[in-house]
């Protein structure tokens, strides 16, 4: 059974480190600088604290008289297997292109809406299981309250005194035992008394089986797609002393010295095409496996598995007096100059979230990662692949978390298979295509509306993450596995690209510059700059992969010839990098749009950079100035990465202050789009590293955008392309030492302070470089 294998895979990989080069290992958090903490319970979801093991997630509120744990399982989505491909859509393609090239963009949009969109036109939403409530009595008269999330141990802890008794609740989600585990204890005997019950917006029933409180139900139908999943959450209670008794739809614990609550959850999902699993049987098996294990046993195994990943990287930007304040107060101040440790905490929180929401065998991180409290998540909680899903994984490889990229690789494998029908039916093309969104059912057709969904580049962008996964590991066997995905994507564009009438350039048509309306009242257009940049990268990695694998010479010749006929990047009359084939930028209705799609070539790509293409870099900078610094959470994070690539450290730092402040960061450190989207967390975490070190094309750029607010600092355990590990220290704004260790023999170029130094790396040997 596939779902059983998902459990088995996590159990097998929970204790495994990646094949990484260990430069140095992050040390224990003796100072407490790796904790989020608060003096009061959460009153809303964006104050609760996230825990997870990739598959199971919970948001812990830390209430006194009533605790809430909001629950998620990563395969609980609406609907069921469905095929949204619009059969015969290709018959409209020629007319759509004619209208676009004639400048009749709104007419083209109307025809796409009528004859080329997915059926249904919306995808399915990620969903919550509901919440488990623990009610102990009145919430008043509690003192000495502290709520915290220890990132180093992936442990939530709540402590307070009530009626002369101290109560402590500790909660974690084990990647080893596949359980949410909570221990409740008091410093006086017989004082633990609770009522457990569920609340859920799902269609579900509660039943009691001995010491098990069980919530079982089905997901919801959406967009005419029938609800096909069943799910179950099973909370098993153990007590020391005291009694457990049923109470209608809940359990009563009375007179206990300590209570241990084990929560298992599963759905019937086995794959995007198979929902025949048995969640009840899976939960029973997981709980049976935990029989005889104490809280301390499970905690030790959990912490060891977490720290094998988390402790690979350390970051020190210095500490200020504000480091002793509660986290919500630090965020409200957002004084990163006086509180540089907040940026380091934010970076490590990003790595914590990645470990908690994307592990081997689980689903990839969506718009909210693993956490969502609704039946209809914001934007469906889907995989929005015109920036957001990609941004989620920007910090993973460099942050020494390659295992966490595995779910994204699995997603791309699936959409490459499903996207073949979409390519054929919508465009009459070979290969595969995916548009700007997909979901757990791996839908690949254009969705939402013609003006949003007519962007056939999502799969091509995701291919860059597969290439990065190879680049950071240099695993030739993995490259051989994924090369057919690159080839299939390239095949699609060889068939899809069409000559535009003015210059004869080969362009994408129809397409759009994601979500940005041009002066003619729609987004529909031909050959936007971002498409060209993404295709440059896709064709390049296809060519490189084929060369490394010594295959497909004739096909690669076609790829090279096609690439040579694509448009160049152009500079407009305002000195900006043009977003479209025509110089429309300054007439666009929203000059401060959240997307900066045409700057993909600057970051995450490096086709534009200040060293090799200074004129294009100057134009990209002008585009950024026109757009402005403040945007949605993820839009702000993207801007920081872009300014870091322009080597403008203090400017990047000023935007980072806005990102980490109360307008764009919730009290629990979740990113505020608003509402919550996790991509801003991941994009912001990556931006901090972009300010300190960059690497591409065998070049390592040291302290490229170091802000004056971080005069001294260090990091260890970072990974770079080429399977290189890196440690770095700097003092008084200057490089102190850079230590590199490579998995292979190779030559790199170290760029620092406008000087380039070639450096020969020998596999397994640490090289120390200083200013």
Image (cartoon, grey):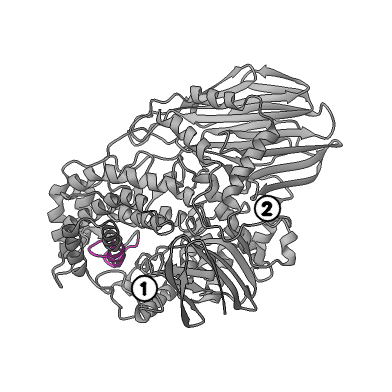
Residue 379: tell me if it is visible.
no
How far across and down, in percent of the image, does residue 711 sit? 64, 75
How far across and down, in percent of the image, does residue 613 sit? 35, 78
Residue at position x 60%, y 18% in the image: 208
Q: Residues within 10 Å of mark 1 (few under 14, many from 20)?
A: many
Q: Relative to 705, does residue 221 appear above or below in the rendering?
A: above
Residue 531 shown in magenta: yes
Residue at position x 43%, y 58% in the image: 472
Check if mark 1's residue and mark 2's residue have beta carbons within 8 Å.
no
Residue closest to the eye, 294 or 503: 294
Disc 1 and disc 2: Cα gap in Å?
Answer: 38 Å
Please identify the quadrant where the N terminus is shown: top left
Query: Which numbered disc covers residue 35?
Result: 2
What span is colored magenta in the figure? 516-538
Residue at position x 31%, y 42% in the image: 443
Q: Secondary structure at mark 2?
A: strand
Residue at position x 55%, y 54% in the image: 351
Residue closest to the eye, 619 or 297: 297
Q: Earlier in the sequence, mark 1 or mark 2?
A: 2
Query: Which numbered disc covers residue 608?
Result: 1
Q: Relative to 650, does residue 125 appear above or below in the rendering?
A: above
Q: Residue furthest right?
A: 164
Q: Secondary structure at mark 1?
A: loop
Residue 597, by quadrant, is bottom left
Please identify the quadrant where the C terminus is shown: bottom right
Position of residue 451 in the picture relative to residue 210 (left or right): left
How far across and down, in percent of the image, does residue 535 sit? 27, 62
């Amino acid at each position: 059974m596939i779902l059983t294998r998902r459990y088995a895979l996590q159990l097998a990989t929970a204790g495994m480190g990646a094949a990484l080069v260990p430069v140095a290992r992050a040390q224990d958090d003796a100072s407490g600088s790796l904790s989020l903490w608060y003096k009061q319970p959460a009153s809303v979801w964006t104050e609760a604290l996230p825990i997870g093991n990739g598959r199971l997630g919970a948001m812990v509120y830390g209430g006194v008289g009533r605790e809430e744990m909001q629950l998620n399982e990563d395969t609980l989505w609406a609907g069921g297997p469905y095929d949204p491909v619009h059969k015969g859509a290709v018959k409209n393609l020629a007319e759509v292109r004619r209208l676009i090239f004639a400048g009749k963009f709104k007419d083209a949009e109307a025809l796409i809406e009528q004859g080329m969109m997915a059926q249904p036109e919306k995808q399915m939403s990620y969903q919550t299981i509901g919440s488990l409530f623990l009610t102990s009595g009145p919430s008043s008269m509690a003192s000495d309250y502290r709520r915290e999330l220890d990132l180093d141990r992936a442990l939530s802890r709540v402590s307070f005194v009530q009626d002369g008794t101290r109560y402590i609740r500790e909660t974690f989600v084990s990647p080893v035992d596949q359980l949410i585990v909570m221990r409740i204890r008091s410093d006086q005997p017989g004082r633990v008394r609770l009522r457990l019950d569920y609340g859920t917006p799902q269609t579900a029933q509660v039943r009691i089986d001995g010491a098990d409180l069980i919530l079982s139900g089905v997901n919801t139908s959406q967009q005419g797609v029938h609800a096909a999943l069943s799910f179950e959450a099973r909370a098993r209670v153990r007590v020391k002393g005291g009694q457990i008794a049923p109470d209608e739809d809940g359990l009563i614990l009375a007179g206990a010295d300590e209570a241990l609550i084990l929560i298992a959850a599963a759905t019937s999902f086995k794959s995007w095409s198979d929902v025949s699993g048995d969640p009840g049987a899976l939960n029973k098996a997981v709980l049976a496996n935990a029989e005889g294990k104490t809280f301390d046993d499970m905690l030790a195994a959990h912490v060891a598995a977490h720290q094998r990943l988390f402790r690979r990287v350390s970051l020190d930007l210095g500490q200020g007096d504000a480091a002793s304040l509660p986290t919500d107060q630090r965020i409200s101040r957002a004084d990163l100059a006086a509180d540089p440790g907040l940026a380091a905490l934010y970076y490590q929180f990003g790595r914590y979230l990645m470990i908690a929401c994307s592990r081997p065998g689980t689903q990839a991180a969506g718009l909210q990662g693993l956490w969502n409290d609704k039946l209809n998540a914001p934007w469906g909680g889907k995989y929005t692949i015109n920036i957001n899903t990609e941004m989620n994984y920007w910090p993973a490889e460099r942050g020494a978390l390659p295992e966490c990229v595995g779910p994204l690789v699995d997603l791309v494998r699936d959409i490459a298979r499903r996207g073949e029908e979409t390519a054929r039916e919508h465009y009459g093309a070979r290969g595969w295509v995916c548009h700007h969104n997909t979901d757990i059912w791996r839908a690949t057709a254009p969705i939402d509306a013609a003006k949003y969904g007519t962007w056939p580049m999502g799969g091509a962008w995701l291919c860059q993450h597969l290439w990065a996964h190879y680049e950071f590991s240099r695993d030739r066997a993995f490259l051989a596995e994924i090369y057919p995905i690159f080839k299939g994507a390239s095949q699609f564009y060889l068939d899809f690209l069409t000559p535009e009438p003015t210059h004869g350039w080969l362009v994408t048509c129809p397409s759009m510059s994601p979500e940005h309306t041009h002066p003619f009242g729609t987004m529909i257009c031909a050959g936007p700059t971002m498409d060209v940049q993404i295709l440059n990268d896709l064709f390049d990695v296809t060519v490189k992969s084929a060369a490394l694998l010594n295959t497909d010479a004739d096909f690669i010749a076609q790829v090279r010839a096609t690439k040579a006929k694509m448009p160049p990047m152009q500079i407009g009359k305002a000195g900006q990098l043009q977003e479209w084939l025509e110089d429309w930028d300054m007439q666009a209705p929203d000059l401060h749009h959240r997307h900066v799609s045409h700057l993909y070539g600057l970051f995450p790509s490096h086709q534009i950079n200040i060293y090799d293409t200074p004129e294009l870099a100057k134009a990209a900078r002008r585009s950024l100035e026109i757009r402005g610094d403040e945007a949605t959470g993820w839009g702000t994070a993207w801007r920081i990465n872009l300014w870091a690539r322009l080597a403008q450290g203090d400017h990047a730092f000023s935007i980072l202050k806005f990102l980490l402040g109360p307008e764009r960061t919730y009290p629990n450190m979740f990113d505020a789009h608003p509402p919550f989207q996790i991509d801003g967390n991941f994009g912001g975490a990556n931006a901090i590293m972009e300010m300190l070190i960059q690497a591409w094309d065998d070049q390592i750029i040291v302290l490229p955008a170091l802000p004056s607010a971080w005069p001294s600092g260090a990091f260890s355990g970072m990974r770079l392309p080429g399977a290189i590990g890196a440690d770095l220290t700097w003092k008084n704004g200057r490089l102190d030492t850079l230590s590199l260790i490579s998995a292979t023999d190779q030559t790199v170029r170290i760029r620092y302070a406008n000087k380039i130094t070639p450096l020969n790396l020998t596999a397994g040997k640490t090289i120390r470089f200083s200013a």
